[in-house]
Amino acid sequence: MPEIKVAIGGREFEVSCQEGEEHYLRSAAGLLDAEASTLNSQIGRMPEARMLLMAGLMLADKTAGVEEQLRALEQKLGAQEALLEEMRNAPKPEPTTVEVPVIPASVSDSMAEIAARTEALAAAIEERASVA
């Protein structure tokens, strides 16, 4: 079983851990050291047991806050998943009918007649212009 030296609050401790767990131990010790260092800077030097207790309580408080946030996010995620499932299971909406206005035949005939007259007038003007 490996023995690791860790520094917490300016003090060194020798701690045992399982093989391969060294990284996790150092990481946890780093978190505890950060809290202990904060305590030392705010309160000053204190007995080892009190420093470790206070640092542990501060970490526990942070952990409780994170767990509360996690629960809230899990509830929100559950609600979103339920809404998504409800939307997936909802019947498909009825197809929407789009009505396109149709130009009445009388208007089309009138436009064609106007176009024909315009072309006839243009031809007559061209004919007169070529004669002159």
Image (spheres, helix red, strand yellow):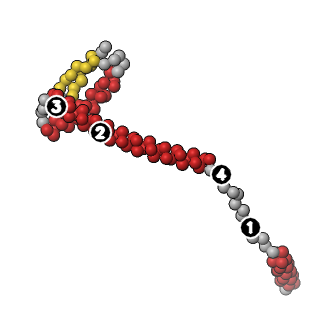
The residue to which callout 1 is attached is 100
Counting from the top left corner in percent of width and height, residue 11 is at 17, 26
Q: Quadrant of the N terminus?
A: top left
Is mark 3 in CB contact (under 8 Å) with mark 4?
A: no
Q: Amino acid at mark 1?
A: Val
The residue to which callout 4 is attached is 91
Which numbered disc, 1 or 4, marks the residue closer to the eye?
Answer: 4
Residue 62: numbered disc = 2
The residue to which callout 3 is attached is 50
Q: Quadrant of residue 64?
A: top left
State left or right for residue 36 relative to residue 88: left
- Could you tell me how far apart the alpha carbons at marks 3 and 4 are, in whole angstroms? 63 Å
Mark count: 4
Instruction: Kindly tell me whether residue 123 is visible in this rendering.
Output: no
Q: Quadrant of residue 52?
A: top left
Helix or strand or loop: what does disc 3 sit on?
helix
- Could you tell me how far apart the alpha carbons at marks 1 and 2 are, in whole angstroms? 64 Å
